Image (tube, rainbow, N blue to C red):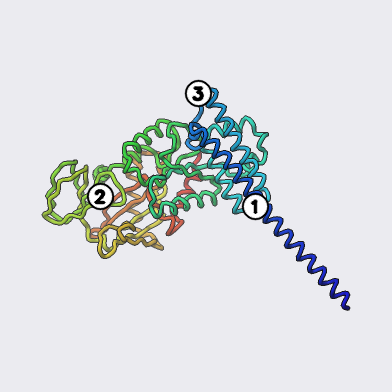
Amino acid sequence: MLINIISFSSLILSILSLVIHYAYSRKNMKITKYDKVTSLFHEIDIRILENPETRDYFYKNLELKDNDSIILKNKVYTISELILDSFEWISHYLETSGKTDKLSWNNYMINVYNSSPEIRKFHSKNIEWHPYFQKMKEKLPNKELLILTTDKINFPDLNSENLSIIKTCEKNNICPTLLSWHDFNPELKYSSPILIRTVWDYSEHIEEFREFLLKLKKSSNVVINNVDTILWNIDKTYLFQLEKKGIKIVPAKYYPKGCEIKVIEKSVLKPTIGLGSQKALLLNENESITVDYDSILTTFRESIYEGEKSIIVIQGKAKLQINKYPNNNDWRVQPQYGGKYKVMDKIDDDAAKFAEIVYKTVHSIYPNKNFIYTRVDMLIFNQQYELLEFEAIEPSLYGDLSTKATQALVDSISDLHY
């Protein structure tokens, strides 16, 4: 009996020893793999730091020209090969890795791959050199989407908006690549559609942004929303064109820079170009002011305290309603001024109808299948809705509050044929 107990105990100890050894080996293997990846990317970083003239060929879609020097070409080819060799090693390693590791690494590798024509060219000429990377690439979704954001500012909800669209794309078999519009080359022709998304600093770089859009249009890329609508939407004087087409707006008047204004009723003065209530002023009756920039003076509606309604419209259909409320000490609804947002379970029928009419009216001005999504802001006055603002450049989809609008946008993009 004692011998049996001793034998059984020995067996248990042996099994425990094997389990501990296996766990330890796996941990060491993981550390070894991590060290290998770190070493590979360290070598790439050193090469690019030693040859800074090559950087844009890997991160800004820059392409070698025929008249570039042989020295530059060889440097770019060498780094392209080194990057692809690193991708090959990682792809091989990922064969036995978990889903989370695969997703994050695959996204990273494809983002770099999509950002460099030279890496893509080198790979296409030497596919047999990187079979594991090619195998990974073939398993990825056929559809890709380039998403433009900014890296020049740090708005609190910028990351959540970007993360929401990325996750939704991945769930819908679309491979997203997030790029700053400041580093994006608009003159190249891309095989994937370009979604202008969280370019939330464009008003601070307005001439650069206009030039960027014009180059994008000239390059004949597929852009969502279409460039003509975005250019038109930059300046808030679009409100007067919509008014002429029968859209009821909050009463407004345009004043050019340097003009002196005598306010006859409580009003809001804001620049014709700007977002998030930038430089907006609340003026009381009989106040006088000389404007420092082209401005619009709109009648202040007390109904703002009952909530501004924002309707997200995707391809002509209202998909989400957010009610925005200022705090007790302010009249602005943006979070940076203490405003609060509430997702409505049901979209108000009259608000949806008004928003859809506004969308269709704009679409009639610039008919284009790539005019897909917008936000329509409105206030109620005398039991009728009035347009406060129409946003087709970079409307928030409120991805941190609801995935409805983001999902509807991605569904629409999936259905388009390019």
Instruction: State which mark lies toward you, 1 or 3.
Output: 1
The quarter of the displayed image where residue 351 is located: bottom left
Q: Earlier in the sequence, mark 2 or mark 1?
A: 1
Disc 1, SS: helix
Q: Earlier in the sequence, mark 1 or mark 3?
A: 1
Crowd around label 1: few <14 · some 14–19 · many ≥20 (10 Å): few
Crowd around label 2: few <14 · some 14–19 · many ≥20 (10 Å): few
Residue at horizontal 77 percent and vertical 62 percent from the top: 18
Looking at the picture, how far across and down is residue 377, in whole percent? 31, 53
Amino acid found under the numbered disc labelled 3: Asp
Q: Is residue 410 above or below residue 324?
A: above
Residue at horizontal 67 percent and vertical 38 percent from the top: 131
The quarter of the displayed image where residue 92 is located: top right
Disc 2, SS: loop
Q: Can the viewer see residue 418?
A: no
Looking at the picture, how far across and down is residue 50, in whole percent? 52, 34
Q: Which residue is mark 1?
A: 31
Q: Which residue is mark 3?
A: 68
Give 347 or 62, whichever is nearer the viewer. Answer: 62
Q: Which mark is residue 279?
A: 2
Instruction: State which mark lies toward you, 2 or 3.
Output: 3
Amino acid found under the numbered disc labelled 2: Lys
Disc 3, SS: loop
Q: CA distance from mark 2 to mark 3?
A: 47 Å
Q: Can the viewer see residue 117?
A: yes
Crowd around label 3: few <14 · some 14–19 · many ≥20 (10 Å): few
Looking at the picture, how far across and down is residue 139, in whole percent? 63, 44
